[in-house]
Image (cartoon, rainbow, N blue to C red):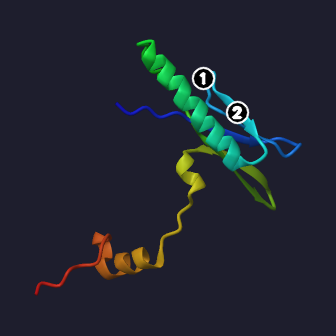
Amino acid sequence: MTARYAIILETERSGAVSAYVPGLPVYAAADTAAKAERALKELLTLYLADLQARQLALPVSRAVVKVARVTTTRRGSSLAIVSPAALVGRARSPRKAAAARANGARGGRPRRSAA
């Protein structure tokens, strides 16, 4: 079974980084995001191992992650709630773009020549 948990990293005004898992009693803080992430990973591992040792079910994450996309123009701002995929963007690698052009509507990987 695979469980997925959202992890939130926030940089405080002081520069410290807080990390937590919504809905679980797992929280860490450190000087950098990398240290906070490592600490949170360690604590989450220990928390889940403790649950398993006590033969308790792993908690089901009820957190839903969405992204607020704010677009500002001369006329004002508009806000849309979108999926986390919006954080990645639409950029394609040059190789993938070339393959899509070469294959037309089929897209995907370059055709192999029949030899």
Q: CA distance from mark 1 to mark 2?
A: 14 Å
- Residue 109, how many percent across, how many down? 30, 73
The secondary structure type at the circle numbered 1 is loop
Q: Which residue is mark 2?
A: 28
* Amino acid found under the numbered disc labelled 1: Gly
Q: Which residue is mark 1?
A: 23
The secondary structure type at the circle numbered 2 is strand
Tag 1–tag 2 contact (CB < 8 Å): no
Q: Establish if 67 lies above or below 75.
A: above
Q: Establish if 91 lies above or below 59.
A: below
Q: Is residue 112 left or right of residue 108?
A: left
Closer-to-camera residue (52/68): 52
Is residue 62 visible in this depiction of the protein? no
Q: Quadrant of residue 2?
A: top left
- Residue 14, how many percent across, how many down? 89, 43
Which mark is in front, 1 or 2? Answer: 2
- Residue 78, how many percent across, how many down? 72, 49
- Residue 89, how many percent across, how many down? 56, 60
For residue 31, the mark is none
Is residue 86 visible in this depiction of the protein? yes
* Amino acid found under the numbered disc labelled 2: Ala
**Which residue lies at the image location 35% right of the left edge and 78% below the top edge?**
99
**Which residue lies at the image location 43% right of the left edge and 19% below the top edge?**
52
Mark 1 vs 2, N-terminal side: 1
Q: Is residue 40 left or right of residue 5?
A: right
